[in-house]
Image (cartoon, grey):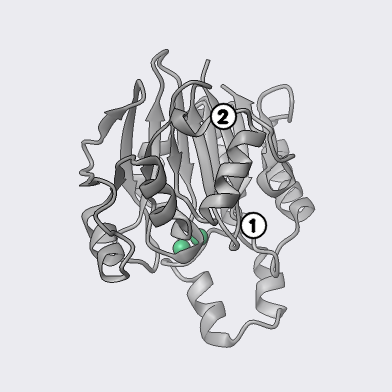
């Protein structure tokens, strides 16, 4: 069995550990290296277990601790060619750790197969990741996407564990204090997935065999964990799917630090 530890999720930082207790990878490093290390040890994961860091895109909430942590651990960093170019120009790649551009063919790491897919987001070249463990189980990470493109659907269908963005409640966003251009950006095809769209996507995916759902990257301003959960559970109830019987669903910011999801 493999495990996923959500270390941080949301606009103030994102990072996940996936693998076994003894070896695995990080998806993103969006908090300080110190905070990431502390959270890892809270999960019972030693730093030397981290074999590589896979980056989704260059926004600060995904790379804040990348330079320091990758340098300290001396592990390779993988990302799309576009993201690496952006990171280079931001001065994040300093030669203290190896960097590899990742094609859609993916790569093997820590006994797993890691395959990226493109996300539609306002960044250079965003990736989500689909990860197959040694025992053939699959986990998919799909956050920071304006909509669920056919490429995303195909990649995440059939994953037993799915980390899916449930960023905002559309009405809260529309009535909230954000300036109009920012609202437009979030709602656009290159923005973030709403609770409503997330719920719709889940109704398809639970039918394709998704067993564990983690709702992630919630907006603090335009969402609440309850609203995200109720929206998805409501849509799933309409197709006759019940929490704890047909699937399990949790909201990441509520997950206790140190919590692990086995799949
Ligand atoms: Zn982003
Ligand atoms: Zn983000």
* Location of residue 248 in the rendering, given as x and y in whole percent from the top left corner: 68, 29
Query: Which one is earlier in the sequence, the residue at label 1 or at label 2?
Result: 2
* Location of residue 60 in the rendering, given as x and y in whole percent from the top left corner: 47, 65
Q: Is residue 98 left or right of residue 160?
A: left
Which dot marks residue 45? 2
Q: Residue at x 75, y 52 (%)?
A: 225
Judge depth for marks 1 and 2 and give the one in front. 2
Q: Which element carries disc 1, helix, strand or loop?
A: loop
Q: Residue at x 33, y 62 (%)?
A: 92
Image marks 1 and 2: residues in contact by CB distance under 8 Å: no
Pick the residue in front: 255 or 196.
255
Q: Residue at x 35, y 57 (%)?
A: 126
Q: Is residue 171 left or right of residue 198?
A: right
Q: Which quarter of the picture shows residue 245? A: top right
**Quadrant of image for the C terminus:** top right
Residue designated by label 1: 218
* Residue 210 visible in the displayed image: yes
Pick the residue in front: 238 or 6.
6
Q: Which quarter of the picture shows residue 27? A: top left
Which dot marks residue 88? none
* Location of residue 70 in the rendering, given as x and y in whole percent from the top left corner: 38, 47
Pick the residue in front: 193 or 256.
256
């Amino acid at each position: 069995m493999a495990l996923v530890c959500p270390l941080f999720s949301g606009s103030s930082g994102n990072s996940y550990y996936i693998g076994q207790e003894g070896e695995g990878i990080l998806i993103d490093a969006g908090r300080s290296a110190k905070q990431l290390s502390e959270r890892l040890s809270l999960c019972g994961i030693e730093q030397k277990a981290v074999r590589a860091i896979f980056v989704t895109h260059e926004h600060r909430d995904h790379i804040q601790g990348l330079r320091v942590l990758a340098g300290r651990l001396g592990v390779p960093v993988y990302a799309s060619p576009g993201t690496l170019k952006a990171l280079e120009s931001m001065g994040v790649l300093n030669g203290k750790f190896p960097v590899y551009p990742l094609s859609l063919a993916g790569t093997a790491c820590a006994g797993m197969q890691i395959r990226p897919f493109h996300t539609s987001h306002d960044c250079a070249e965003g990736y989500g990741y689909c990860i197959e463990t040694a025992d053939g189980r699959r986990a998919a990470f799909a956050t920071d996407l304006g909509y669920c493109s056919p490429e995303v659907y195909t990649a995440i269908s059939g994953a037993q564990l799915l980390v899916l963005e449930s960023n905002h409640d559309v009405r809260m966003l529309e009535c909230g204090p954000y300036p109009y251009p920012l609202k437009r950006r979030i709602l656009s095809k290159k923005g973030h997935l709403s609770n409503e769209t997330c719920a719709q996507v889940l109704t398809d995916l639970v039918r394709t065999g998704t067993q564990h759902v983690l709702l992630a990257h919630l907006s603090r301003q335009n969402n609440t964990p309850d609203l995200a959960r109720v929206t998805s559970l409501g849509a799933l109830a309409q197709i006759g799917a019940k929490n704890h019987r047909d699937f399990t669903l949790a909201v990441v910011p509520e997950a206790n630090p140190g919590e692990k999801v086995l799949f």
